[in-house]
Amino acid sequence: MFKNAKLAKLLAIQAKLRYFRHLNNLTMSAILALAGSNSSTSINFKLVQYTAGLIEDKEVQLLNMANYPFPLYSEDYEREMGFSNSLVELRNDIMKAKGVIISVNEHNSNPSAYFKNVLDWLSRLESKFLEGTEVLLMSTSPGKRGGLGSLEIIDKLLPRFGANVSAKFSLPSFYENFDSEKGITDSTLSERHQMVLTEFLSKI
């Protein structure tokens, strides 16, 4: 029994070493961009999409989280079913990126249950899945606070996973300040957005 446990531990260590060698051989994606929402009509995804479109000199991988359904995390589920291929692929995409753009939605002044669940799953698979990663953290909502409550919570949470939140931006009153063709229509907010994006890109 002891020998079997020791062998299993050794095999797990070897598998992890092989994974990191494989990761080092992969082409680094400069920037990964996603929203913390799984809604097919997410306004936070629209903000991320717009932001990614402003980046000209770096590779950007845009993820639509509506295509990433995950079951509610539980120890029982993890023990019985393990980690899904979608979760492993998401973890790999994040760890290959030099920088990540995230725009978080808000439910009752908190991050959505969906995004918190994504973070729970990722941290079980790799506790420091954002180690050494620069993050541009954004939020928006139809209200005047622009999802600020959610942004503040996630801002405190991401460093636990190794992230450096290097720039932040909140867009209030999305439907008044954003146009699908023009982008951010308020000049002051547009200048602020460009400033934090420039600050973020300078660290990639």
Image: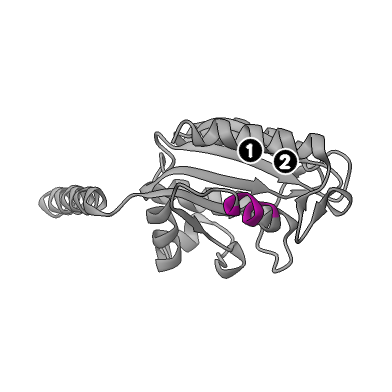
Q: Secondary structure at mark 1?
A: helix
| Residue drawn at (15%, 50%) of the image | 14
Q: Which amino acid does the dot numbered 2 rest on?
A: Ser
Q: Main secondary structure of the magenta part?
A: helix
Rendered image: mark on residue 44: none
Direction from residue 1 to residue 111 in the image, left or right: right
Residue 40, compared with residue 166, is above or below; it is below
| Residue drawn at (14%, 55%) of the image | 4
Q: Quadrant of the N terminus?
A: bottom left
Q: Residue 138 at what x, y percent from top left? A: 67, 41
Judge whether residue 106 is colored magenta: no
Direction from residue 22 to residue 191 in the image, left or right: right
Rendered image: mark on residue 150: 2
Q: Secondary structure at mark 2?
A: helix
* Tag 2–tag 1 contact (CB < 8 Å): yes
Bounds of the magenta span?
Answer: 47-53
Relative depth, front residue between 188 and 160? 188
**What residue did someone put label 1 on?**
154
Q: Residue 168 at what x, y percent from top left? A: 65, 33
Relative depth, front residue between 143 and 119? 143
Judge whether residue 49 is colored magenta: yes
Q: CA distance from mark 2 to mark 1?
A: 6 Å
